[in-house]
Image (tube, rainbow, N blue to C red):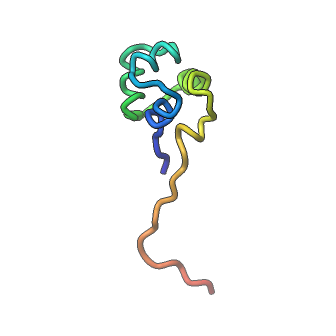
């Protein structure tokens, strides 16, 4: 599973609104608004690059991998 941490990164570097993110990353207003709310269902490489440049971070900061807890029993070794 991958978490979305765009808003957290924005706040950490002083970007307080979707409009500020829009201007910093040169994104369309609707895209910046969705991203600022961590509402990301699909993403282009171009948009990811713009976000990373504007927020001065790597993609892993914005989209960290979160290990899911597996339910059920582990398979027994034979």
Residue 12 x %, y %: 50, 34
67 left or right, relative to 57: left
Residue with the most extreme front position: 14
Asked if residue 11 is positioned above or below residue 72 in the image, the reply reads above
Residue 65 x %, y %: 54, 49
Residue 49 x %, y %: 60, 24
Front-most of 45 and 16? 16
Report the residue at 40% width, 28% height from top. 36
Report the residue at 42% width, 21% height from top. 32
Residue with the most extreme bottom position: 78
Asked if residue 12 is positioned above or below residue 16 in the image, the reply reads below
Asked if residue 3 is positioned above or below residue 28 in the image, the reply reads below
Front-most of 6 and 73? 6
Residue 71 x %, y %: 41, 71
Front-most of 25 and 46? 25
Quarter location, residue 53: top right
74 left or right, relative to 16: right
Report the residue at 46% width, 24% height from top. 15
**Quadrant occupied by the C terminus:** bottom right
Quarter location, residue 56: top right
Asked if residue 4 is positioned above or below residue 55 in the image, the reply reads below
So how many labels did they put on this image?
Answer: 0
Report the residue at 39% width, 22% height from top. 17
């Amino acid at each position: 599973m991958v978490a979305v941490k765009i808003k957290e990164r924005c706040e950490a570097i002083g970007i307080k609104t979707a409009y500020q993110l829009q201007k910093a990353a040169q994104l369309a207003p609707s895209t910046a608004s969705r991203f600022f709310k961590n509402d990301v269902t699909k993403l282009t490489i171009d948009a990811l690059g713009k976000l990373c440049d504007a927020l001065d971070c790597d993609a892993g900061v914005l989209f960290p991998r979160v290990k899911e807890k597996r339910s059920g029993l582990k398979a027994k070794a034979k």
